[in-house]
Image (cartoon, rainbow, N blue to C red):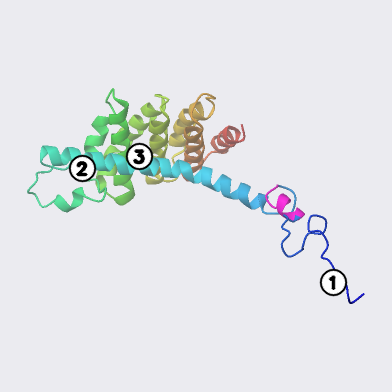
Amino acid sequence: NPSHPQRSPPTHRFPDARTHTSTPCRSSHANMPGKGGNGGAQQTASRKSKSSSRNKRGDTAVAEAAAAAHRDATRSGGAGGAGAGDGDEESRYDGVVTEQAFRDGLEQLESKRGSSRETGLASAVRFMQDNVSAPVIDELAAAFKRGALGSLKKSRANETVLACKLLSLLAMHIGPDADATAQDLNAALRTVIDKPSMDADARAAAVETLSVVTLVCATEDATTEATMASIEG
């Protein structure tokens, strides 16, 4: 009847679709694995993040050790034994490790203090990364290998990660046709991998180093098979 205005229906019974908000069903499954959403992508990203944390951890330790070496050098008037006025000032910045600091790192690996050993390992890693063909590496490679193997026995997580980095670099420096080296490192790295109480990052670093050593140095099938058994286990 046009003489009577129509009343609007109660809003509590008939909500306006324009103001009614709800979460679509598919959004509740978007982040669940196996539902066709992006859960798989998130899991992949998580795995990549965990994998990269090991390298970041070692790289951070290298940078911190280099900074500590610079501070010590500044106090003593020289970097790694160099005099303050010998024109080597620039090399003491930006984490650059001098040859003398590399040599000093070998002595630090014999220290009873874990922090000193980590500094020595970090200095060696940084120097080898920046000076792949330096003759001093040939001279001290065997000694640094012994020092790094000694650090693996300390069961310190950060020290183990740094020692694994150094052993990987040494393996690449030694090169192919060095099955004896591969066997030697295989045995040492397996003690880290097979130790349940060892830090997960340290064990993962040992697996990565074992893979590098076997790929670069191993020549015998038995050595490769031993590596595969360690990784699969």
Residue 82 x/y as whole percent: 12, 43
Q: Is 145 positioned to the left or the right of 136 in the image?
A: right
The nearer-to-camera label among 3 and 1 is 1
Q: Is residue 40 left or right of residue 177?
A: right
* x and y percentages locating residue 77 in the rendered image: 10, 41
Question: In the depicted view, which residue is nearer to us: 197 or 2?
Answer: 2
Q: Residues within 10 Å of mark 3 (few under 14, many from 20)?
A: many
- Residue positioned most to the bottom: 2
Q: Which residue is mark 3?
A: 61
Residue situated in front as seen by the camera: 138 or 9: 9
Q: Which residues are magenta?
A: 25-32
- Disc 3 to disc 2, how far (Cα)? 14 Å
Q: Looking at numbered disc 2 in the image, what kind of residue is underneath it?
A: His
Q: Residue at x 63, y 52 (%)?
A: 41
Q: Earlier in the sequence, mark 3 or mark 1?
A: 1
Gap in angstroms between the C-alphas marked 1 and 2: 87 Å
Q: According to the image, label 1 marks what residue?
A: 5
Q: Which residue is drawn at the image coordinates 28% and 22% (left, top)?
A: 112
Q: Quadrant of the C terminus?
A: top right
Please give the residue where the numbered disc 2 appears in the rendered image: 70
Front of the two marks 1 and 2: 1
Q: Is residue 113 above or below residue 206?
A: above
Query: Does residue 171 appear in the picture of this structure?
Result: no
